[in-house]
Image (cartoon, coloured by chain):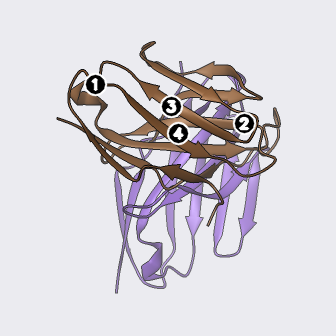
Amino acid sequence: ETGVTQSPTHLIKTRGQQVTLRCSSQSGHNTVSWYQQALGQGPQFIFQYYREEENGRGNFPPRFSGLQFPNYSSELNVNALELDDSALYLCASSLGLAGATDTQYFGPGTRLTVL
Amino acid sequence: GQSLEQPSEVTAVEGAIVQINCTYQTSGFYGLSWYQQHDGGAPTFLSYNALDGLEETGRFSSFLSRSDSYGYLLLQELQMKDSASYFCAVKNYGQNFVFGPGTRLSVLP
């Protein structure tokens, strides 16, 4: 039990729709990262927020966007859904200490299926 | 860019020792982490090496050699519950994490 929660657990959308996924981080964790994990592959880094500002982004198009709120919750928004967006979406919170052992605590994930 | 390589699958028997290797190409990073993920579950942190050498945590040990761009996770006294996927990951100087493709470990009775 990491103390990181995500909602919803599962979601089915159709191509072209928009989706918002939510994450609640551990209290005191200033950093939240979002990952996309396709079946049988490693997590792919989407972006990271530190104290409500994006401070790192992976190789994902602008239709992937996010928000982080002062209450340690965050959102991942995906517009114009494509079939390839079907994956497990993971959020991970950490203390946000640059250069330190910044252990990430993952939530259980949201399984998104795009039809 | 950064990339990490791991064997896709490893099989071992209960009680045995298994080593999962990770080689990487990255311009700069703080340290090498290892995560375990059971089917249908979330990745959980196992170990972290900031410096070269061996780190031991119970049955798990992890090793890093920056000069060889290489690390490994060593699992001793294997148990059935160790059957899972194992990922190496680096935190680069851009504060981003890069994960390897994962190694699926199967522990046989």
Q: Is residue B70 visible?
A: yes
Q: Amino acid at mark 3?
A: Leu
Mark 2 vs mark 3: give the one in front: 3
Bin the neighbour count of mark 4 within 10 Å (Cα to Cα): few under 14, some 14-19, many 20 and up.
many
Rendered view: B7 above or below A19: below
* Furthest residue toward left: A115
Give the image quarter of residue A84.
top left
Where is mark 3, residue-wise?
A76
Question: Measured from the top left, where is residue A57 in percent x and y?
Answer: 57, 20
First in residue order: circle 2 vs circle 3: 2
Bin the neighbour count of mark 3 within 10 Å (Cα to Cα): few under 14, some 14-19, many 20 and up.
many
Give the structural element (helix, strand or loop) at label 1: loop
For the residues labelled 4 and 1, the Cα–Cα distance comes to 39 Å
Where is mark 2, residue-wise?
A31
| Shade of chain B as shown in the rendered figure | purple
Where is mark 4, residue-wise?
B23
For the residues labelled 2 and 3, the Cα–Cα distance comes to 14 Å
Question: Measured from the top left, where is residue A27 in percent x and y?
Answer: 77, 51
Chain coloured brown: A
